[in-house]
Amino acid sequence: MLKSFEEVKSQGSLDYQAFEQQRQDSHAKNKKGLIMGGAIGGGLVLVGIILIAVGLSIGGLLIFLGILTFGIYFAVVNSKAKKELKGKILGDIVKGIDPEFSYSVGDREFVPEFRKSGFKKSASGTTVDDVFIGKMNGMRFGLGEIKVVRKQSEKRTITVYQGPFAHVEAAQNYGFTSIIPDTMEKALGGVGRLLQKADISRLNQKLLKIEEDQTFEKYFAVWSKDEATTKQILNPEFRSYLVGLATMSQTYVGWRDNKIYFGMDNRRDLFNLKLKNPITESTVRQFYDDFAQYYNILENVVSFVTTGSGAGGNIPSSDGIDAPPPPPAGENTDYYGPSGNETPPPPPPPPGF
């Protein structure tokens, strides 16, 4: 179980004054970047206007380049400053939780792991952000944010997955199973199920039906190469836990060889901040809670797969006592902030935990 926020804070590893000073310095650099970008971009726009006035069409191109230069210059400076500040805060948080935990802006290891999971069978672009690496009960894990897009035409792409994704390296080989949202059957009924069975992209997996659990069937489609192992792992308690997650966000779980996978397509951009807003304890606490929330869900999923029962517990509260997670942003703006950048809370542990 993770250390509570109060435990991390009591260690002295969270220096709010240092975070705020870095924010102020970064905000000042951004203002200089805005002035510099404005000077360069504005100069190009002015020259473009003059050239158009004397009848030279190239002036339009200079105006466009001026606006583009200003936007790119400011965006690059702003993005770099935000990443540095976010890296400092999140790095200190996870080091306070466990000295062996680490944070990085991105990790390309997540791209091949996402493909192996079988969660999405085709994609044209993948970006990775906010990656946490460490060990969970002796097993190496990676937990980060991932966005996957698919090209529909020459000019159009759609987002097919955006949210947390994690992989854990277990000691045992579990075969190959992908448990994904049952969007096709839910939308098309029996026709959708026939289309699922005809999915040629999953020829190496078989569509399983959990006949005894129609609630689970309503939310999930199970593709597997090992029916017996999969049904043994998907015991009633695990299915109940997954249904609880699925009622709040599209949930993905799977395993391939010795890797266990978990993901949520919730279209959230976690660990976001604005340089103009002061860094306070509540800002840092929100970062901690968002990380702890997904870590604890992942720990439960891994425990169900490896031991047959969940790890139990919710997000540790500030007083060190396990407590249910706070409600979504619409009901609790103090926790998630007025921006509505909420993450659906995990369900309580199954009965008996």
Image (cartoon, helix red, strand yellow):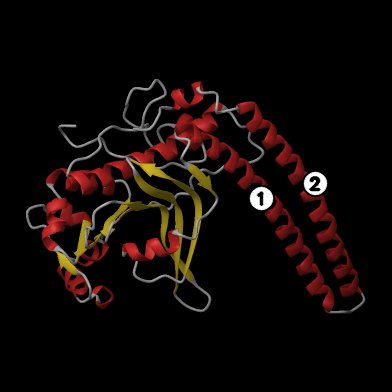
* Mark 1: amino acid: Lys
Local SS, label 1: helix
Q: What element carries label 2?
A: helix
Percent coordinates x, y for residue 234 in the rendering:
16, 51
Camera-side residue: 81 or 278?
Answer: 81
Q: Is residue 24 visible?
A: yes
Question: Residue 263: x, y in percent?
Answer: 35, 53
Q: Residue 80 carries which label?
A: 1
Q: Is residue 304 above or below residue 64?
A: above
For image coordinates 37% across by 41% down, the residue present is: 295
Task: Give the percent coordinates (x, y) of residue 64.
Answer: 76, 69
Q: How many marks?
A: 2
For residue 318, which quarter of the picture? top left
Residue at 92% x, 76% y is 54
Q: Which of marks 2 and 1 is nearer the N terminus?
A: 2
Name the residue carrying label 2: 32
Q: Residue furthest left?
A: 212
- Position in image of residue 289 (x %, y %): 43, 34
Question: Is 123 located above or below residue 341 in the figure?
Answer: below
- Dot 2 alpha-carbon crowd within 10 angstroms: few under 14, some 14 to 19, many 20 or more: some
Question: Which quarter of the rendered picture does the C terminus lie within?
Answer: top left
User: Which of the 4 image quadrants contains residue 179?
Assistant: bottom left
Residue located 27% across and 51% down the image: 171
Quarter of the N terminus within the rendering? top left
Asked whether, in this view, residue 235 is left or right of residue 250, the answer is: left
> Is residue 329 something that shows in the picture?
no
Mark 2 and mark 1 residues within 8 Å of each other at the beta carbon: no
